[in-house]
Amino acid sequence: MPMIDVTIPEGALKPEAETRLLKELTDILIRAEGFDPDSNKVAQSVTWLFLHRPAAIHVAGVRSDKPRYRIVPTVPEGQYTDAARAALVQEVTDAVVRADGGKFEEVSARVWVFPMEMPDGQWGSRGGIRRLPEIQAMLGGGESGRHAGQDDHKVGQERLARRRRAKALQLLEGALDVAQKGAAAD
């Protein structure tokens, strides 16, 4: 159930390039979640993209003469690993550069990508809270050649557990660093 907020100034891209970009961004995000965007109709139906058109974009308080692009893909917690997040940023940036038609070095400096994970238990849909294992089972059930059920539910549980282990490790490493610096200062 990914959501994508895309900020593109009006007229920044040719209409056909913008249409292709928006479809490509949707497909990139579905793939980043581990599904085939061409065959998974369920994933397609729940991947929403919101296009934002700012009246102006300013850099250092001055109206920018070149378009700036901001893409914020949001998924339930547990969907991204560090490697998946890095690949997503690269793929999205490459897609925007192609749509813009400029050189990577010039356009990529004007592309910001913020992959976000919504904490488990805070993703609401259809009047209720949807947790990652439930979402994973629903999306997996739409995959060609796969069936909804425990395997997809388990994938969601494992992804969430992996993400929580990584967060706990970061917290412990930070606490250890503070403790070591405190002991060295004494």
Image (cartoon, rainbow, N blue to C red):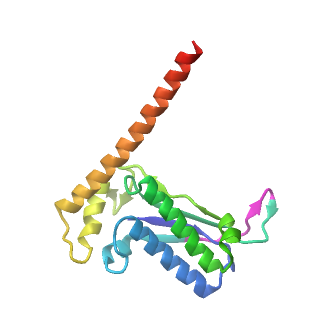
Rendered view: 140 above or below 133: below
Q: Residue furthest front?
A: 184
User: Most prominent secondary structure in the magenta stretch?
Assistant: loop
Q: Residue furthest top?
A: 186
Q: Range of the magenta residues?
A: 51-61
Q: Residue 71: where, in percent of width, then height?
A: 56, 65
Residue beneath the point at 23% across and 58% down: 153
> In front: 166, or 60?
166
Q: Is residue 184 left or right of residue 29?
A: right
Q: Is residue 68 left or right of residue 116?
A: right
Residue beneath the point at 77% across and 60% down: 59
**Quadrant of the rendered structure where residue 36 is?**
bottom left
Picture quarter with the C terminus = top right
Q: Residue 171: where, in percent of width, then height?
A: 44, 35
**Quadrant of the rendered structure where residue 6 is?**
bottom right
Q: Residue 69: where, in percent of width, then height?
A: 64, 68
